[in-house]
Amino acid sequence: MEIRLEEEKDFLEVENMVRNSFWNIYRPGAYEHYIVHNLRQDESFIKDLAYVIEKDGKIIGHINYSKGKIQYENCLKDAVVLGPVAIDDEYQSQGLGTSLIEYTLELAEDYHYIFVIGDENYYMRFGFEPASKYNIFLDGTDFNNENPFFMIKIFDSDKITNDLGIFHNPDVFNVNEDDVDEFDKNFEFKEKLVLEGQLGV
């Protein structure tokens, strides 16, 4: 098993694995694989932090990082966000996601701090904490209330102020469902299902 940088020859295999791992989990179908595909051509993409886990010639894990923006009252600052991260269906719950995140976070320390949007109980183990603690809030959410799923890991506390900041994901994260459906024609057909536990269900 090897953790290594993603290469161009991996692209389609990565997208297929990401699609399978997210399919019908958070919504009917998935769009994370479409984000992964588009990120590689986007200026926000951090190529040096795009890693895969390979086992016996098969890619079983993948992680991306990209640059969003923090909007302060008088300025706009780049800020790195982790994700999507995916582990092959057959290899989940074996600690591989933890290994991939820990490995790449060590490489990301020069960025001073990293954001993530996800399960707070999962990401706390990596040193993430609510970003609202530092007066930074996710675009589109109520900054009068804490959003525990929007988190930050700080490597250099001198780079953080308590000024009110609004974090904006890279534009590539905003996807159109029709565009995703068209992109999905490149893959094996999978049925979209509405399942209990999905967002909004």
Image (cartoon, grey):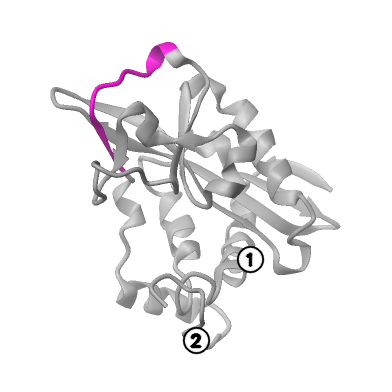
- N-terminal label among 1 and 2: 1
Q: Please, is residue 163 above or below residue 64 in the view?
A: above
Residue 46 position, x and y percent, is 47, 37
Residue at the outermost front position: 145
Secondary structure at badge 2 equals: loop
Q: Quadrant of the C terminus?
A: bottom left
Q: Which mark is residue 193?
A: 2
The residue depicted at 33 percent of the width and 29 percent of the height is 78
Magenta region: 158-168
Q: Tell me: 107 left or right of 169.
A: right
Q: What amino acid is found at the position of numbered circle 2 in the picture? A: Leu
Q: Tell me: 69 left or right of 22.
A: left
The quarter of the picture where residue 9 lies is: bottom right
Q: Nearer the viewer, mark 1 or mark 2?
A: 2
**Front position in the image: 89 or 4:** 89
The residue depicted at 64 percent of the width and 64 percent of the height is 13
The residue depicted at 69 percent of the width and 34 percent of the height is 103
Q: Please, is residue 63 above or below residue 161 in the view?
A: below
Residue 116 position, x and y percent, is 47, 43
Q: Please, is residue 200 above or below residue 151 in the view?
A: below
Q: Residues within 10 Å of mark 2 (few under 14, many from 20)?
A: few
- Say whether residue 165 is magenta: yes
Q: Please, is residue 176 above or below residue 64 in the view?
A: below
The residue carrying mark 1 is 17
Q: Tell me: 86 left or right of 152.
A: right
The residue depicted at 86 percent of the width and 57 percent of the height is 56
Measured Cα–Cα span from mark 1 to mark 2:
18 Å
Q: Residues within 10 Å of mark 1 (few under 14, many from 20)?
A: many
